[in-house]
Image (cartoon, rainbow, N blue to C red):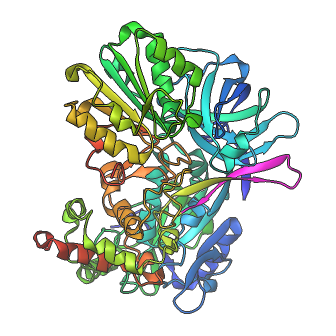
Amino acid sequence: MKDIQYMILSKDNFDAFISRLSKLQKLVAPVAKGYDNYAFEEVTSGDQIAVKYIPTVLPPKKYFLPQRETLLEYNVGKGLEVRPVAEYEKMAIFGVHTCDLAGIQCLNMVFSIRPRDYNYLIRKRKLDIIGLECNEYCDKHASCCLVSSHLPNGGYDLFFTDLGDYFIAHVNTQVGENIVESTKYFTQAESLHLEALKDMREKKRAAFKNEVSIEPAFIPEMFDRSFDSKVWKELEERCLACGNCTNVCPTCYCFDILDEMELDLRTGRRYRQWDSCQLEPFAKVAGGENFRKERSARQRHRYYRKFRYPVVKFARFFCTGCGRCSRTCMAEINLKETLNALAMDGSEWKK
Amino acid sequence: MEKVVIKESNYRIRKAKILRTKQLTAHEKLFEIALEGGETLDYEPGQFMMVSLFGVGEVPISISSSPTKSGSFEICVRAVGKVTSAMHRLEAGDEAGIRGPYGKGFPIRILEGNDLLIIAGGLGIAPLRSLIKYALDNRRDFGKVHILLGCKTIQDMLFVDELDQWSKRMDVHYECTLDRAAPDWVGHVGQITTLIPGVHIETERTFAVVVGPPIMYRFVIKELLEKNIRERQIFVSFERHMKCGMGKCGRCQIQSLYCCQDGPVFNYAEIKNMKEALQ
């Protein structure tokens, strides 16, 4: 019994596949950047890629919602001329973990809901996504099982799982099929390969357990009762309000919109760039009033934007369990610890 | 990175021309603006616009005129930040860029047929002027119209000529108080809350619409509730610094609400217990 949706790439052919793909279009993939640090960067050969990696410093969000992008170009020289523009780059992203696929799915929802964000949607169409499965936990910060992002839930064109001597690839879209066909290194998956995939997934299901002491179904309710929790005050005492946690978050998308004039004082652009609800001026208005002045209110806002508010609007958590916020925090504010502390606050929600 | 010019951008700007300006106080200036090509802006009282000054930035400003007036609209701008200060340098004939309107305005359809108790503190008169003008242009559709205005000093008073007209109209009950006044001031002195107990209202059919600085709401609403106005019959409008106006940038978020889409006008009953809103 064959399954047409699954293809096999021998590891002997991995380098050749990557080289070929990188010649067909720009290819980015996780690259090792020193001890436990990885980043998505352009690659041209397989040996540049860290196939086994813990979440990159920045998620692939940086390709979908660049740190800075131009929205308008204008010329105020003689009469006002304004051109709305969109920026994009055609490329394939190789090696996207399931947590980051979930992050991209969240961003897709936010920018597709009306009024649609065409700048995002135009760029998204130009990005091919090749996922890569984690057969085991990356590190202690991950909480992907909590949010069910440890297993693939779509959101990719092609999805690789490492099964020893070979990768098994799930072909999810026509784009994925084109990658398979144009690179010519894949063979049809046989039943033994599919069995091996099934075995691996079963082992994974046994190894991945909810990482916190509260069932996901009770989390919205827990947050409903936690607005005045002392946990937020405790975070305030540690938080440096640096905004690292939101920058590295695959589902944080808040932005500022700014103008920049050229030295000719005629032409210029309006651009948006990542902003952070953790920074002091974020909720400030011109008169000086600040609606989230306390760090506790800002940290709380971050957690509610992951676990409570999106449940209303998008029927899902906006935490992907990648662990980046905990990994990057200089004050060691830890997402799993925060959730556990909130759970401790009201014993009836503990599992 | 490739770049394409797109037609359907949400950030597309409509070109507009400043027809007239009026310096209202040392800090506030009124701009009358018309869209290029003679188009009429379709808006509701209480909505806001994103106003652009290219090279400086874009800011959300509430509309001060009533949609009953066609051909142009007005915004009242306080010079308080980088963009608004630069806007004060604009004069009649200058070009501006706008997008919008955005947000949920005052619930005209609900207010119609009822008595209005309009309470404005400071710059709160700017969006409320849109509602007041709308109600006065459609005077038959409303019951009694009470306008209570609070200003810091006489120098901070906006739309002085119009206030004078309103105070003289038979079909409007208008009162004004100053926080601090010179000896020659013959009107009320004190906080705006001091005006509320003296207003004769039929609580059943009165809708209060309150706009002012954040600190004002708590005290004004307390007075209104003491007069037995129902919570559902109180509307407020919030100030937040919207950057996109489309529920994306996150700047105006109040818990799960986006001030730019779910507001800026809110029903008091719906937000009264919401932290980050009034509290």
Q: Residue furthest left?
A: A348
Q: Which of the 4 quarters of the picture holds residue B62?
A: top right
Residue A284 image point, x, y percent: 51, 56
Q: Is residue B86 above or below residue A276?
A: above
Say whether residue A193 is visible: no
Q: Residue at x 53, y 69 (%)?
A: A247
Q: Is residue B228 above or below residue A156?
A: above
Position of B70 with respect to B171 (left or right) is right
Q: Which of the 4 quarters of the picture holds residue A142?
A: bottom left
Position of A263 with respect to A334 (left or right) is right
Q: Is residue B67 above or below residue A287?
A: above
The magenta segment: A259-275
Q: Residue at x 69, y 65 (%)?
A: A24
Q: Residue at x 43, y 56 (%)?
A: A291
Q: Residue furthest front?
A: B183
Say whether residue B241 is visible: yes
Which of B13/A281 is in front?
A: A281
Q: Which of the 4 quarters of the picture holds residue A62?
A: bottom right
